[in-house]
Image (cartoon, rainbow, N blue to C red):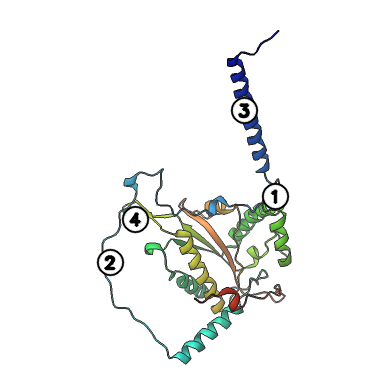
Amino acid sequence: MFLLTPVLVAVICIWMVWIFKNADGSTERRKGEPGAEARPWVDEDLKDSTDVHQEEAEADEWQESEEEVEHIPFSHSRYPEKEMVKRSQEFYELLNKRRSVRFISNEQVPMEVIDNVIKAAGTAPSGAHTEPWTFVVVKDPDMKHKIREIIEEEEEINYLKRMGPRWVTDLKKFRTNWIKEYLDTAPVLILIFKQVHGFSANGKKKIHYYNEISVSISCGILLAALQNAGLVTVTTTPLNCGPRLRVLLNRPTNEKLLMLLPVGYPSEDAMVPNLTRKTLDQIMVTV
C-alpha cells in the first residue's frame, strides 16, 4: 500500500496551489480579451506621463531649471461693472451656441483664421510655462484620406470589440459610428499633440509638468476661438490611432495625440441632436 510521507504531502500541496493560481490567471487573461467584458477601452497613447521620476532615464539626460526670468509690470484693462456684465453675458451666449457638428462643408476657410485661432490656443497657461503642445494642421486631401483610413480601421474595432455595449449604447443618441466622412470633407484637420517632455537647446530632455492638463486647457481655448470665428468642429479622440497617426505625420516620439478637430463651415444639411445643458445651479456651488 502506497503511504504519503510528510515531504510528499508538502510537494503535492505546493503543486496543487501552483495549478490553481495558474488557472485563476488564465481566467483573468480571458476576461481581458477584446469583447469579453464591457469595460471602457483605455488608450495607452493618451496616458499622462507627468511623473517627473523617469526611472528609465539617467539624471544627466534632463535639463536643469532655467535661470531667473525678468518680471515686468502687469498691464490690465478694467471695465465698468455694467460693461463687465454685458461682455460676460455676450461671451456666454456666443459659446452656448457652440455644438459638435459632424456635417462639415468642403468650402475652404481662410488660413489666416486658422493661424489666429491656434495662436489663441497657444496663450493657454501651462505647467512651469513649458507650453507642451504641437498643433498639426492638415489640408492635403491625400493626407486627410490616409488619416481617415487609419481612424476608421481602428474605430470599427473600437465599436465592435473594445468599447463595450454600454459605451456604444450611450453613443446611439448621437447617431455616430466608425464612419467619419468629415475627415475627408472638412477643409482643415487640426491634430493636437501633447509633448510628454521637451528638449533644450543642448539636446537634454526638459520636463513638461502637467502636460495633459495644460494641452487640454489649450484645446478649450481653441474651441472657443473657433466658435468666435464662426467655424464648427467636433472633438474627436481616436482610440488606438495615436501611434500610427504620429508616424504618418512624422512627429517625434515625445509627442502623443490628444485630440483631433475637423474644422470648417457647417454643411447646408447639417443636423445636431437637440440637447440641453445643465443649469447654473447644477454646475456651480457657492461657499
| Labelled pair 3, 1 in contact (Cβ < 8 Å) | no
Q: Residues within 10 Å of mark 4 (few under 14, many from 20)?
A: few
**Residue with the mark numbered 2:** 69
Q: Position of residue 54 (x, y in %)?
A: 41, 47
| Helix, strand or loop at mark 3 | helix
Mark 2 vs 4: CB contact within 8 A: no
Q: Are marks 2 and 3 in contact (CB under 8 Å)?
A: no
Q: What's the distance in space between the residues labelled 3 and 1, CA to CA?
A: 34 Å
Instruction: Give the answer, above or below, for where 138 lies relative to 284.
Output: above
Q: CA distance from mark 4 to mark 1?
A: 42 Å
Specify the quadrant of the image occupied by residue 105.
bottom right
* Residues at marks 2 and 3, CA–CA distance in whole angstroms: 63 Å
Mark 1 is on which residue type?
Lys
In the rendered structure, which disc, 2 or 4, sits on the residue that comes first in sequence?
2
- 286 with respect to 21 (left or right): left
Residue 161's disc is 1
Residue 66 versus residue 41: which sits nearer the camera?
41
User: Which circle's residue, 4 or 1, is located before the other in the chain?
Assistant: 1
Q: Secondary structure at mark 2?
A: loop
Within-10-Å neighbours for mark 2: few <14, some 14–19, many 20+: few
Residue depth check, mark 4 versus mark 1: number of the one nearer the observer: 1
At label 1, counting other C-alpha atoms closer than 10 Å, the crowd grade (few under 14, some 14-19, many 20 or more) is: some
Res 36 → quadrant:
top right
Residue occupied by mark 4: 200
**285 on left or right of 73:** right
What amino acid type should be assigned to the residue bearing mark 4? Ser
Which residue is under mark 3?
A: 17
State which tag comes first along the sequence, 1 or 2: 2
